């Protein structure tokens, strides 16, 4: 019996979870590890999985599917091999929790940010994302994240962002002007 086989089976099954395009829901097996050498059965394996959704219900659905898959993969491996020296177990631990939510586009904070963005010559776009703003939003406090401009390949090893001095100063000006405009709107 090998926890590596159970983990591999679970990761493959996780890849087949179907999620809706709306509300936007996503998941990723981002880190897999364990074992000590190429010719020994690992005593421990792990994977780090990220799950996010605009909807608490969809997030719960993906998490339920994930939990079921882990149980199934462990049970399948224990049935497939001799367990006289012990059974493998799955130990799922939550390492972070980012709640879902949105700030309405009509909120004073969103409108202030949009006005400042237009004043700087940009056309504001409104997107839902998973950022630190999720925490106050989940508490009923209007919150936004202001984008920094040019960048690409988010969440990949070759992610990039324009960090020239001019862009950083401009980003700071936009944030400060948004804070000022939101304070004046209140």
Image: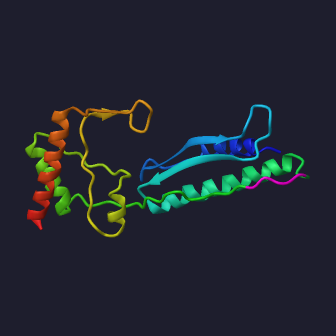
Query: Foreground: 38 or 136?
Result: 38
Query: Residue at 20% of width from left, 62% of height from top?
Result: 107
Residue numbers of the magenta segment: 85-89
Query: Residue at 56% of width from left, 59% of height from top?
Result: 94
Q: Is residue 161 above or below residue 23?
A: above
**How did the renderer colour the structure?**
rainbow
Q: Where's residue 102, x and y in %?
A: 32, 60
Residue 145 highlighted magenta (yes or no): no
Query: Residue at 15% of width from left, 47% of height from top?
Result: 174
Main secondary structure type of the part rendered in magenta:
loop
Dividing the picture into quadrants, the one containing residue 141 is bottom left
Q: Where's residue 110, x and y in %?
A: 20, 57
Residue 146 falls left or right of residue 33: left
Dividing the picture into quadrants, the one containing residue 159 is top left
| Outermost residue to the front | 36
Q: Where's residue 76, x and y in %?
A: 79, 49
Query: Residue at 71% of width from left, 43% of height from top?
Result: 9
Query: Foreground: 127 or 51?
Result: 51
Residue 53 falls left or right of residue 179: right
Dividing the picture into quadrants, the one containing residue 7 is top right
Q: Where's residue 98, x and y in %?
A: 43, 58
Quadrant of the snapshot with the C terminus: bottom left
Quadrant of the snapshot with the N terminus: top right
Residue 88 highlighted magenta (yes or no): yes
Q: Is residue 84 above or below residue 11?
A: below
Residue 156 falls left or right of residue 106: right
Query: Foreground: 44 or 16?
Result: 44
């Amino acid at each position: 019996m090998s926890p590596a086989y159970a983990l591999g089976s679970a990761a493959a099954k996780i890849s087949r979870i179907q999620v809706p395009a709306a509300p936007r829901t996503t998941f990723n097996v981002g880190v897999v590890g364990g074992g000590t050498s190429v010719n020994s059965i690992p005593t421990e394996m792990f994977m780090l999985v990220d799950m996010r959704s605009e909807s608490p219900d969809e997030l719960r659905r993906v998490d339920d599917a994930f939990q079921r898959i882990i149980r199934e993969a462990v049970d399948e491996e224990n049935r497939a091999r001799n367990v006289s020296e012990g059974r493998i177990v799955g130990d799922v631990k939550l390492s972070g929790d980012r709640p879902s939510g949105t700030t309405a586009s009509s909120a004073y904070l969103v409108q202030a940010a949009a006005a400042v963005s237009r004043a700087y010559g940009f056309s504001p776009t409104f997107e839902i994302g998973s950022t630190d703003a999720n925490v106050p939003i989940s508490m009923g406090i209007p919150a936004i994240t202001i984008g920094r401009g040019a960048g690409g390949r988010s969440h990949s090893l070759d992610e990039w962002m324009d960090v020239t001095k001019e862009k950083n100063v401009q980003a700071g000006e936009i944030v400060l002007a948004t804070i000022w405009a939101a304070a004046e709107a209140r």
